[in-house]
Amino acid sequence: MRYILIIFSLLFFIGIINGFRNHDSSLNKGLKHRVPGYESNPSASRRSNPNDPPAQWFTNRVDHYDPQNTNTFKQKFYVNDTYYTPGSPVFYILGGEGPVGASYVTGHFVFNQYAQKFNALLVAIEHRFYGDSIPMGDLSLENLKFLSTQQALADYAAFVPFLTQKYNTGSSKWISFGGSYSGNLSGWLRLKYPQLISAAIATSAPVKAQLDFPEYFEVVSQSIGPTCSAIVANITQTVNVMLNNGQNEQVQQMFSACDPIITDLDIATFMESLSSGITETVQYNLDNNNYTFTNITAMCSRFEQSSDPMKEFIDFNNEYNQFSGSQCTLSSYKKSVEYLQSSNYKSVNASSRSWNWQCCTEYGYWQTGSSLNQPFSNAITLEYFTQMCTDIFGPKGFIYQPAIQYILNDYGGANIQATNVIYERGTIDPWSVLSVQSQPNSESQVFLIDGAAHCAPMYPSRADDLPGVIEAREMEISLISSIVFNN
Ligand SMILES: *[C@@H]1O[C@H](CO)[C@@H](O)[C@H](O)[C@H]1NC(C)=O
Ligand SMILES: *[C@@H]1O[C@H](CO)[C@@H](O)[C@H](O)[C@H]1NC(C)=O
Ligand SMILES: *[C@@H]1O[C@H](CO)[C@@H](O)[C@H](O)[C@H]1NC(C)=O
Ligand SMILES: *[C@@H]1O[C@H](CO)[C@@H](O)[C@H](O)[C@H]1NC(C)=O
Ligand SMILES: *[C@@H]1O[C@H](CO)[C@@H](O)[C@H](O)[C@H]1NC(C)=O
Ligand SMILES: *[C@@H]1O[C@H](CO)[C@@H](O)[C@H](O)[C@H]1NC(C)=O
C-alpha cells in the first residue's frame, strides 16, 4: 500500500488583523492573528548565509482559468540539490501564508534529514501574494481577486513540469510537504493532481473549514490545565468588570494598551491582543522551532506560583509584546483596520492583508470567545471578525461570507478522499480540532501525537522529542519509502 503523508498544519489561523510575527516560517506561524506592529519578518526568511542557495524565479500565470488573461508573475523558489541523485524523489515544500526563505531548504525543517536519507531534491516554493511573489506588484482589491486556494494549487501544479525539465528529474517521484495551511495545500495538491504528486505529508492541517471556531480557545484552556485556566479567567473577568465600570483608562494603563479603549470593537481588539501571549505559547509549545516566547509549563507555573497573578500576567504580557516587536498591547480597532487597508497594501511585507483576505473570502476559522468553556473574553465575537472583513476590504455594508461550503465540496473537508495520506495532529494543538479525526479511507492514515503542539514533527529532531513525535517521523519515513521504492 502506498501512503501519502499529509502534514496539515495550521498556518492559517485567521486572525485577522493581527500580523503576528510571521518569523520565517509560513509553514508554521501563519495562522495566528495578525496584529499590526507584529508584521511578518521577512528579514528572517532572507537571513543570508553565503552558502545558502539563491532565490530563483518561475514565471507563472496570474489567472490559470481565464484564457484571455495572459498576465504572468514571478514566483519565488529555492532548490537544495546537495543530496540529490537521479531517480531519487523530489521533496516539494509548499509555502503557506507567509514569505519563504532559503532556510526552507537548508535545515529549518526535518525534511532535510529525510532528504539526506532518500537522496532527495529539496524544493521550496512561495505562495502567491506572500513574500516576494506578488502578482501585479501589489495587494490592491483588484489583484486580490486572484488570491484563492484554487489558483495557488494551480501554481504549484504548473511548477512541477517546469522544475522537472530544469533539473532533469523526469524519473523522480514528487512528495509534497506542508504544515498548517500549507499542510492543507499539500493534501489537496495530491487530491487534485495525483498524476504529478505521488504522496503528501500534512501536519496539523485544519481540514474542516468552519466560520466560527470557538474550539480554539477551548483547546488552549485544556492544554494549560484547570488551575492556569482559572487564573486567566479571573484576569479576563477582572478586566470585564473594570470596563463595565467605565474604568477604561485604568485598563489602558494597567496593560500598556497602545491607544484608548473606547468602542466595543476596541474592546474586542484589546481582549484578543491580551489572549495572544497565551494562545501562541500553547500553539507552538516546545516545537523546536527556536522562536517561541516561552512554554506552557514555564508560563503557568509563573502565574500559579505568584502571590499576585494579575501583576505576573501584566509582566508576562509586556514581555510578550516586546518579544513580538511591539511596545504596547494593540487596542485600537480603527488603527488595526487602517493598517490593513489601501495605504499599506503595497507593502510586500504585509502577509496579514493577504491572509485576512483568504480568511474573509474562503476559510472563516474565526477564533471567537463564544464558548463558555474557555477563559478568554466573549467580547471577541463573530460580528467583530465579520465587521473587520468589511472594514478592511469594503465596500461599506457588504458582508463577506467565506466560501466554506465550496471549499468543503471541492476538497472533501475532514472526509478528504486522497489516497496514501497521513494526517498528523498533536493533542495540545488548538487547531487539531479541525484536522482529520478518523481515517477517511483505507489508503490514508490518521495519527494523533500525545502532548504535541502545532506542527511539532516538522522541525529537526532532538534528544528530548516526545515519543509520539519520534513515532510520527518514523511513520513518515516508512511511508516515503513505500512510495519511493514502490513496495
Ligand atoms: C542543503 O541543506 C543542507 C542542510 O540540510 C546544507 O548543509 C547544505 O549546504 C544545503 N545545500 C545547499 C546547496 O544549500
Ligand atoms: C480573582 O481572584 C481573586 C483572588 O483569588 C479574587 O479575590 C477575585 O474575586 C477574583 N476575581 C474575579 C472577578 O473572579
Ligand atoms: C535551533 O537552535 C539550535 C541551537 O542554536 C540549532 O542547533 C537548531 O538547528 C535550531 N533549530 C532550528 C529549527 O532552527
Ligand atoms: C520551558 O521554559 C523554561 C523557561 O524558559 C525552561 O527553563 C525550560 O527548560 C523549558 N522547558 C522545556 C521542556 O524545554
Ligand atoms: C519590508 O521589511 C524590510 C525588512 O524588515 C524593510 O526593510 C522594508 O522597508 C519593508 N518594506 C516595506 C514596503 O514595508
Ligand atoms: C483544509 O483541508 C481540509 C480537507 O483536508 C478541509 O476540510 C478544510 O476546509 C481545509 N481548510 C481550509 C481552511 O480550507
Image (cartoon, helix red, strand yellow):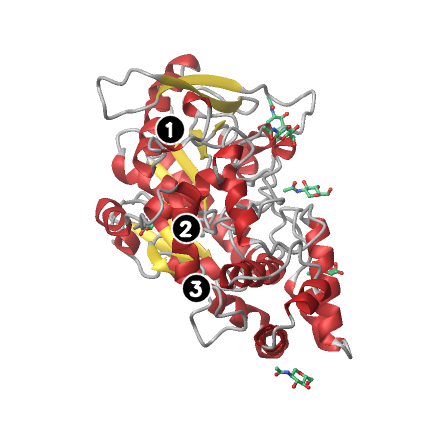
Q: Regarding mark 2 in the picture, which secondary structure is present there?
A: loop
- Residue holding disc 1: 143
Up the image or down, 271 lies above or below 122; here it is below
Image location (x, y in percent) of residue 449? 48, 60
Label 2 neighbour load within 10 Å: few <14, some 14-19, many 20+: many
Q: Amino acid at mark 3?
A: Thr
Image location (x, y in percent) of residue 118? 49, 32
Residue 453: assigned label: none
Q: Amino acid at mark 2?
A: Ala
Query: Is residue 28 rendered to the left or right of residue 359?
Result: right
The residues tagged by marks 1 and 3 sit, at their Cα atoms, a distance apart of: 29 Å
Q: Which badge, 2 or 3, is on the more N-terminal residue?
A: 2
- Tag nearer the camera, 2 or 3: 3
Which residue lies at the image location 57% right of the left edge and 78% below the top edge?
Answer: 226
Q: Amino acid at mark 1?
A: Asn
Contact? badges 1 and 3 (CB < 8 Å): no
**Cβ of mark 2 under 8 A from ligand 6:** yes
